[in-house]
Image (spheres, rainbow, N blue to C red):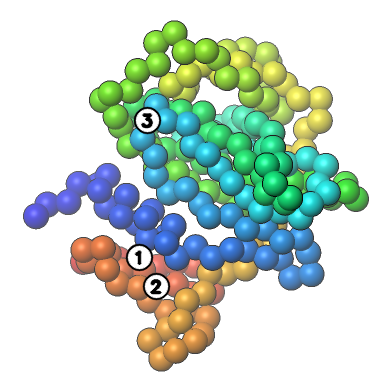
Amino acid sequence: MKRGPQLVSLLLLLLFSAITAPAEENGGPTFTHQPVAVTKAGEAVPIKVTLPTGLTEVRLYFKTLAGSRPFFVAMAETAAGEYQAALPPAKNRSKGLDYRILFQDSTGQVFQSKEYRLLVLDDSRQRHAGAAEIAVSAEQGGQEVVRDFAVPLRVTVTTEPLLAVAVPYDHPPITVPGPGGGGSGGGLIGLGGVSATIAVGGVGISIK
């Protein structure tokens, strides 16, 4: 049976989501996040992360795959150390979103996570005519209404740009047991011939 490119991409993203482990920086703040792999056009996407308490700022940055300018929304602390915000609903034919999480501790140190990619599946039922605008912020540009999403974004330029000074968070490599037991690498096979090899510093993928 012939596979379409979108189906293969969906299978790969679901595989990565299933094997992603919580991240923790050695000697630094803990960071736990389960990436969201796929969504439908027209749906807002809740993003959750567990971080230390006492942070002064937690932001969710995002952009479309075609966009070069990231926007952000503040993440609210819904419980001790648990933060949440939502990605705005994407349009049909937007293909995907990139997002990352930024946080600032009480000493003023700013960290940013690696960038996560979210696949957006087209949905013929998507309807957002007359939908209210969503308020977001940006670190550059001007105040405007952006229509790259299923709902218009009302953009305000922040007076506290942090992304440029953020230190990349030291995510450890993903590890899974190998065929002979524990170790820093291994392989997973399934999802109709999709295989992934996990190793320190990278992920290898092949389609059979």
- Farthest bottom residue in view: 180
Q: Give the number of the mark in front: 1 or 3.
A: 3
* Vertical order, 160 against 164 (above or below): above
C-alpha gap between disc 1 and disc 3: 27 Å
Q: Residue at x 62, y 63 (%)?
A: 23
x, y percent for residue 97: 47, 38
x, y percent for residue 101: 64, 45
Task: Decide which of 45, 116 is in the foreground and name it.
Answer: 45
* Vertical order, 54 against 67 (above or below): below
**Left or right of residue 118: residue 3:** left
Q: Residue at x 79, y 52 (%)?
A: 53
- Residues under numbered marks 1 and 2 in contact, where contact means CB atoms less than 8 Å apart: yes
- Farthest left residue in view: 1
Between discs 1 and 3, the one toward the N terminus: 3
**Left or right of residue 108: residue 80:** left
Image quadrant holding the N terminus, namely bottom left
Label 3 crowding class (10 Å Cα cut-off): few <14, some 14-19, many 20+? many
- Farthest top residue in view: 130
Helix, strand or loop under label 3: loop
The residue that disc 3 covers is 41
* Vertical order, 104 against 196 (above or below): above
Which amino acid type is marked by label 1?
Ile
- Residues under numbered marks 2 and 3 in contact, where contact means CB atoms less than 8 Å apart: no
x, y percent for residue 183: 51, 85
The residue that disc 1 covers is 205
Helix, strand or loop under label 1: strand
Which amino acid type is marked by label 2?
Thr
The quarter of the displayed image where residue 154 is located? top right
